[in-house]
Image (cartoon, helix red, strand yellow):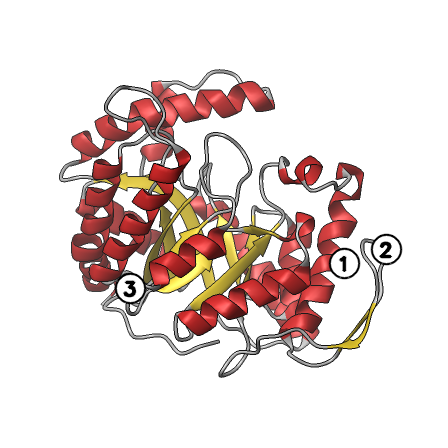
Amino acid sequence: MHETSEQESSVLIGVNTFGDVGLGPDGEPKPHAQVIRDVVEEGKLADQVGLHAFGVGEHHRKDFAVSAPEVLLAAVAAQTQTIRLASAVTVLSSDDPVRVFQRFSTLDAVSHGRAEVILGRGSFIESFPLFGFDLDDYEVLFEEKLELFDRVRSQKPIHWEGRTRGPISGLTAYPHLEEGLLDTWIGVGGTPQSVARAAHYGYPVSFAIIGGEPARFAPFVDLYKRSLEKFGKPYTQLATHSPGHIADTDEQAREELFPHWLAMRNRLGVERGWGPGSRTEFNAQASRAGALYVGSPETVARKIAETHRVLGTERFDLKYSNGTLPHSVMMKSIELLGTKVAPLVADMLA
């Protein structure tokens, strides 16, 4: 892993976004191009307020504007100095592992060693038909492509053969990194098989905690550490990723977030067969034990510190974009996370 600058807290704090499409002044969805420009501005602010990492997710649907994270991250790299630049996540199953490595090794070059790729299967399936992949191959696609990516990442001649693409015999992918290997994580939603697979390759895990209690991930942390020992891999770090929003007071943060959370929750609910969301559900998720990190800087800092104590993870990434939440409100949330929350977490864990 590349060395990173020390943060005030023993928990490294970052942010990520899917480029959620918000509403413009006329109440209509913003053009994707404007959302993308807004995300660049958000990444610039995250760097200015001292956050550790800025992650951008890959999606291929109307309500999320970002389909090429590494291109957007390169734009952010040109306007930032120290912040880590990550995908959140790259859908490896429907991509080519060689090209994924090449795009992120290029990002690493233009950012002077700040690139990270977080690999995952994604929680949406639009990329599969878009790029011509069969959902019946969901498992084998990720397993084979992760194996190939690991060999490409080594920056050595590649010898690989599988059923999901043509073989490679002795070729090497370029460009290489100036120093070390490309920082690579596995994004995990909470299945034992995914945790064990990440440990097999020795990759750190970012747990996506988007519902329920963060404490329920403790068994997965234990499984990961046991699996690393089994495979003879060293421990590096673990992270959690959760949605949330920060404002000056708890009430303000909840009132700003709720209508946008509800709209997104119900839109996805129709797609996935869930019942309608409610204020009761929102309040439960926003409570001390829930997966929404929403509230004043003190409230959110306390929740991050508690997650660290329970899980022992070294990094926390806040998904600050939530449906149609306005750009200006998200900018304030990022500012408070860097200037207020991070120092408070440091004090709480000192």
From the top left corner, tell me how far across and down residue 74 is, in percent: 41, 60
How far apart are the two marked residues, 1 and 2, measured between alpha carbons?
A: 8 Å
From the top left corner, tell me how far across and down residue 216 is, in percent: 50, 46
Q: Looking at the image, which residue is at 62% across and 76% down?
A: 233
Label 3: state its secondary structure. loop
Mark 3 or mark 2: whose residue is earlier in sequence: 3
Q: Looking at the image, which residue is at 23% across and 29% down?
A: 256
In the rendered image, is residue 89 in sight? yes
How far apart are the two marked residues, 3 and 2, measured between alpha carbons?
A: 41 Å
From the top left corner, tell me how far across and down residue 266 is, in percent: 46, 20
Q: Is residue 265 above or below residue 348?
A: above
Which mark, by number, is residue 80? 3
Amino acid type assigned to the residue bearing label 3 in the image: Thr
Which mark, by number, is residue 144? 1
Comparing labels 3 and 2, the label whose residue is closer to the camera? 3
Comparing labels 1 and 2, the label whose residue is closer to the camera? 2
Label 2 sits on residue: 163
Pick the residue in front: 294 or 288: 294
From the top left corner, tell me how far across and down residue 224 is, in percent: 59, 62
Pick the residue in front: 304 or 64: 64
Q: Residues within 10 Å of mark 2 (few under 14, many from 20)?
A: few
Figure quadrant of the C terminus = bottom left
The answer to whether mark 1 and mark 2 are in CB contact below 8 A is yes
Mark 1 or mark 3: whose residue is earlier in sequence: 3
Amino acid type assigned to the residue bearing label 2 in the image: Arg
Pick the residue in front: 236 or 82: 82
In the rendered image, is residue 227 in sight? no
Label 2: state its secondary structure. loop
